Image: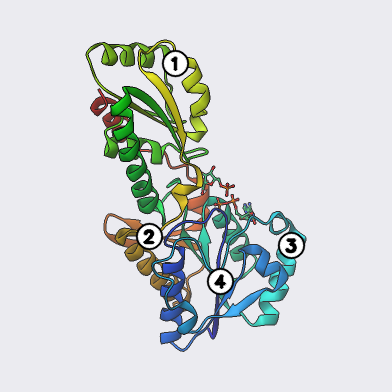
Amino acid sequence: MKKIGILTSGGDCSGMNAAIRSAVRTGLSKNIEMIGFRKGYLGLIKGDYLVLDNKAVSGILQRGGTFLQSARCEEFKTEAGRQTALENLAKIGVEGLVVLGGDGSLNGALALHRLGIPVIGIPASIDNDIAFTDMALGVDTALNNIIYAVDCIKDTASSHARAFIIEVMGRNSGYLASISAIASGAEYAIVPEADYDLADICSQLRHRFQEGRDNAIIIVAEGAGHAQTISESIKDAIGFETRVTVLGHYQRGGAPTVFDRLLASRFGKRAVEFLLTGESGKMVGLSCHDIIVTPLEEVVKTVKRPQEDMLRMAEMLGI
Ligand code: ADP
Ligand code: F6P
């Protein structure tokens, strides 16, 4: 293998840059030419790439987002789109590809593998909904962002005896909501994976208000309901005045934590090493403290749910 390409696709996350840097420097140390495609699969279809030397990836480790940029590319979901991508890869002489992204992007990586392109995926999505890795890239940074915001909100909530409904990301996943609820001491986590009873939540909040608590924090995953709607439904029944904060894309940015920098460096290095040993159609992942590799076919057909004991712990500790 003489030339390896790398791309970042789908929702961005902190740590992508650190993983690109690691993959590039690993490849260069083995005399592989490294190139980066811009804007995910769109770059493959347009043949839009840049050569990545050591200098090109210097100074990016600590930056959130992805300097290669990311995109959602409908055309790549079509056979014709993938055919164009294949032709460009052949023209440019790319013999292996590293794909960073969430479950959609990993489906795209699997499609390329099935067309004969050696490809290794790196799980990168703040939702932490990708199976066969304890943590995806960006999750730890997003959690730290959330915790910082919730701590700030709790201060002002206490001053005014208010309940805050804080909406975090997670279209289909309650991971960020449940873990941030535990780590911030929130009263409730409302997640798409578990039923909740607003009447029950109201009566417990009212009880808390009556016993003199000075604030309450409810963290809701966007996939489980809108914070504003929940606030409207409970505001007259709980005693506390209510306010809403939607954290939105703030969660996805910022300098990666040490955990994400290290994970990104390990994932990037191993992805290139796996390609060079002839592996393809696989995803690197973290299992306990080890880097493992799993066939993408297994990854994309497995649904990852938040751990039941974490959901129960969030509920029990919030009381
Ligand atoms: P994420 O990777 O963050 O889950 P998306 O689900 O939007 O984000 O997927 C990102 C991109 O991956 C899509 O815009 C598309 O280009 C590609 N992709 C998604 N699903 C498939 C698929 N089944 N086959 C081929 N490419 C796909
Ligand atoms: O990265 C995954 C995710 O954070 C989801 O939780 C969220 O719904 C989605 O991205 C929103 O991304 P965008 O605004 O880029 O479409």
Q: Nearer the viewer, mark 3 or mark 4?
A: 3
Where disc 1 sits, the SS reads helix
Quarter of the image where one finds residue 212: top left
- Residue 234 is tagged as 1
Mark before the other along the chain sequence, 4 or 2: 4
x and y, in percent, of residue 183 in the image? 27, 39
Quarter of the image where one finds residue 61: bottom left
Q: Counting other residues with Cα less than 10 Å from the Cα at mark 2, is it few (<14), some (14-19), or many (20 or more)? A: many
Q: Residue at x 51, y 64 (%)?
A: 66
- Residue annotated with mark 4: 118
Q: Are marks 1 and 4 in contact (CB under 8 Å)?
A: no
- Residue annotated with mark 3: 81
Quarter of the image where one finds residue 260: bottom left
Q: Compared to 294, does 279 lie above or below? A: below
x and y, in percent, of residue 116 in the image? 62, 70
Q: Residue at x 45, y 81 (%)?
A: 27
Mark before the other along the chain sequence, 3 or 4: 3
Residue 64 is at least partly visible in this image = yes
- In the foreground, 206 or 200: 206
Mark before the other along the chain sequence, 2 or 1: 1
- Residue annotated with mark 2: 256
> Could you give the CA–CA distance between mark 2 and mark 1, rounded to whole angstroms?
36 Å
Q: Counting other residues with Cα less than 10 Å from the Cα at mark 1, is it few (<14), some (14-19), or many (20 or more)? A: some
Q: Name which residue type carries label 1.
A: Ile
Q: Name which residue type carries label 2.
A: Pro
Q: Nearer the viewer, mark 3 or mark 1?
A: 1
- In the foreground, 293 or 241: 241
